[in-house]
Image: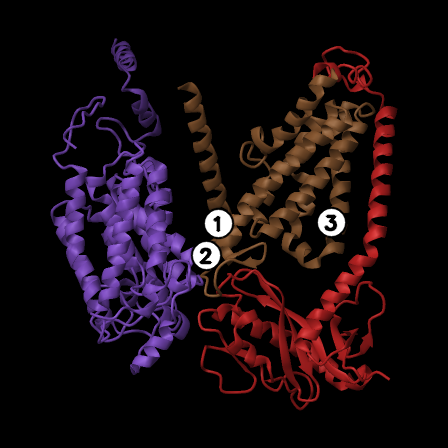
Amino acid sequence: MNQTVIPIHPAPSQAPAQPPSPQATPTGAMLRTMGLVSTICGLIIVGAYQSTLGAVAANKKIALERAVFKVIPAAKTIAEFVALPGGEVKEKVGAGETAAGALTFYAAYDGSGQLAGIAAEGGAKGYADTVRIMYGYSPTCACIVGLGVVSMRETPGIGDKIITDKAFLANFVSLDAKLNGELKALANEIKTVKHGAKTNAWQIDAISGATITSRAVGKAINESAQSLLPRLVPNLDKLKKS
Amino acid sequence: MSTIAAAPRTWDEFMEGIWKQNPVFVMVLGMCPTLAVTVSGVNALSMGVATSFVLVCSCALVSLMRSFTPKEVRIAVYIVIIATFVTVVDYAIQAISLALYDALGAFIQLIVVNCIILGRAEAHASKNAPVPAMINAAGMGVGFTIGLLALGVVREIFGAGTLFGVSLFSANFQPWVIMVLPPGGFFVLGSWLLLFSWWARRKEAQQNA
Amino acid sequence: MSSTIEIRSAPHVKGSRTVEQIMRQVVYSLVPVCAFFVWQYGISALALITVVTGVCIWTERVFTGTGTQSGHIQDYSSVITGLLLALTLPPGFPLWMAAVAAFISIALGKALFGGIGFNVFNPALVGRAFAQAAFPTAIATYTPSFLSGRGSEFIPSSLALPLMQPADTAAWLHGMQIDGWTGATPLAQWKFEQTLVGAGELLTSLGGHLPIGPSPVLIVLCGLYLASRRFMDWRIPMAVFGSAAITAWALFLLDPARFPTPFFTLLSGGLALGAVYMATDMATSPVTPKGMWFYGALIGFLTVIIRNFSGLPEGVMYAILLGNAVTPLIERVTQPTPFGKGASKKARRAASYSLNPSYISRDGDVQERDKS
């Protein structure tokens, strides 16, 4: 062990004296080393980035498509759009930052290029952390037609029933999301009611025992729909692809 | 260094990290990923492999650079090297599976501050030639992976009734929710530590007798 | 017990009561409560009590056999842990889960610390906390009391196979066609449905088909027996009830629509059982009188806070566990001042080393010099 250590030391420490004076190593040597290390590391990182770029982008695209297709089963292709605060809707180009207040959503098209639905994300505070969901909106029936969970940290076995509970998911087959007369807000606020108390098409029947998570889902959809749909609905024909 | 002594020494260097200085069960290092990501066998294995990769690569580079590295800037050099390989692993996992990337979360980036790696770089790689440094680092990495797997397997069996995603019981299995929550990590780690110390003490008693 | 020789340092003052005597009295006082529980829920409750107590005794036996424990298997403490744990679980709790909870109670709650007297937390509550975290659905599944066939028919969830999910009690109850039954405890009903169960029903626990535990009145009566014979300190339950009532009353005055009445708070859930039997556990509660008041008040306050401001309907368990955790601190702060010493900090510090003879004599020297 010791034998291997000895030849290393004389190089950096010219003076074997005890006090570790700052002059022990010339600044140039330190700069040279750091520069060398940075160059090598930079090259490695760039190499890794370049070689994985394609695969990462493909993975992200597949993950997004899977999420959208789950909430709009008829969809075959998707396009990303932004809805600006002024009420304007345009297709998103590139991966850059969106303007302040702009809402991102995805238009999904079926095999023949017809608009099959709109998918958007929403989030609200659940039991443990924010529950992020994606919902599908169908312009033809003006209702929510599907629900998927993007991310959550709810208690396994209780809160995560929102993914599996069939009775709960049945709420999102045709959940009413009509706009009011002025097209400024939803005609009826989407709201989670306690288990077994659903009476209207815009209400969500909560899961018994997982009321807080169920409420978070309702709140997330309501908040997102209240802000997105008034901008989206007047511009629906812009989404129609040739 | 004679060639006769080299073979067993290499083996010892490798085994040191697996048994005598196991980072999880003996040194109790790197507890952050140990407790956080071991909710399933696959997560534990991926985390172990990722850490081992960073460990071996950075120890090799640190060892190669050891004669140019003034001691004043050595920590900065180690951190830059480690961070580089963590970035590489980060991209690689994103390219392999986004689901796995989401499951491991911030703990991939946090490998940078994993004290096992910095400890190996400082205590071993900076004083040894690249090949022994890599062997030692590989041993540590395997030891760490075994430690993570020991936790991950137990937590997955109780927490989900599966092993590497394969269902072990009937569909009616009752998951122990606590096992996939953070307290479950502490309970399982504590039980393993208990088992190891009991075993070590018994062995010691036998040797003394 | 008598065959062991005790080697202790002075003072050799010993109370006439042994641990075994005290523990046996506590077990006797728990018998009526357990009997009431069995009367309410029938054979399932009996099986639950038997299994939990049996596993607790077995675990205790295994650990006392290793020679690392302070207690003996005969000292009845594991029986108390078993009975209390069984009383805090729903009557239809799957027996295999109950066995796991019982094992955790003794192994993690007591044996790891070195046996009776060394445990930091109430063992029964450690087991229950584990079960709450591991099986949150099963532990929240209650069935109504006083069902007609309870003496001969098990609640189906009790007999779940080990590691398997319990049967659906909701479907079973539906098959029995009971009108107006509810599987939610009074606390859960208040928390999630904002319906308040009447005080009379809560007081006696005799109201038909309510999923509740033994009557608070009975528990308090049993506690009074223990307190009157000085097997339990009356200050802790008094402080728990008092502070829970005051906190609940203050909240009720603030917003009667949002918070339940103080009576409801006192009579519902496990507050009576927790205050009388669990908070008073000798090893995990303070020994100083002032400390007992503070400890009890903290538990009562935390219970109400957790019930009203968290996602859980019941908070007694966590309140007592938190109280247990701060017990050493409470004891340090509430040390009584030794006789003859002033209340000032300086004097108290002097008291801490005055036991050393050399210091005592030097103290005397100083006093003499002062006089001269």
Label 1 chain ID: B
- The reply to whether residue C239 is in sight is no
**Residue B202 in the image: above or below residue C313:** above
Is residue C259 or residue C31 the one in the foreground? Answer: C31
SS for dot 2 = loop
Q: CA distance from mark 3 to mark 2?
A: 31 Å
The earlier-in-sequence mark between 3 and 2 is 3
Q: Which residue is mark 3?
A: B90
Question: Is C313 left, or right, of A133 in this rendering?
Answer: left
Residue wearing tag 1: B184
Left or right, B122 with respect to C91, comes to right
> From mark 2 to mark 1, how far is it between C-alphas?
9 Å
Chain C is shown in which shade? purple
> Is disc 2 in contact with disc 1, using a CB cutoff of under 8 Å?
yes
| Chain that is coloured red in the picture | A
Q: Which residue is mark 2?
A: B176
Q: Residue at x 85, y 69 (%)?
A: A93
Q: In which chain is the residue bearing label 2?
A: B
The answer to whether dots 3 and 1 both sit on one chain is yes
User: Which chain does tag 3 point to?
Assistant: B
- The amino acid type of the residue labelled 2 equals Trp
Query: What amino acid is at disc 3?
Result: Asp
Coordinates of residue C103 in the picture (x, y in percent)? 34, 48
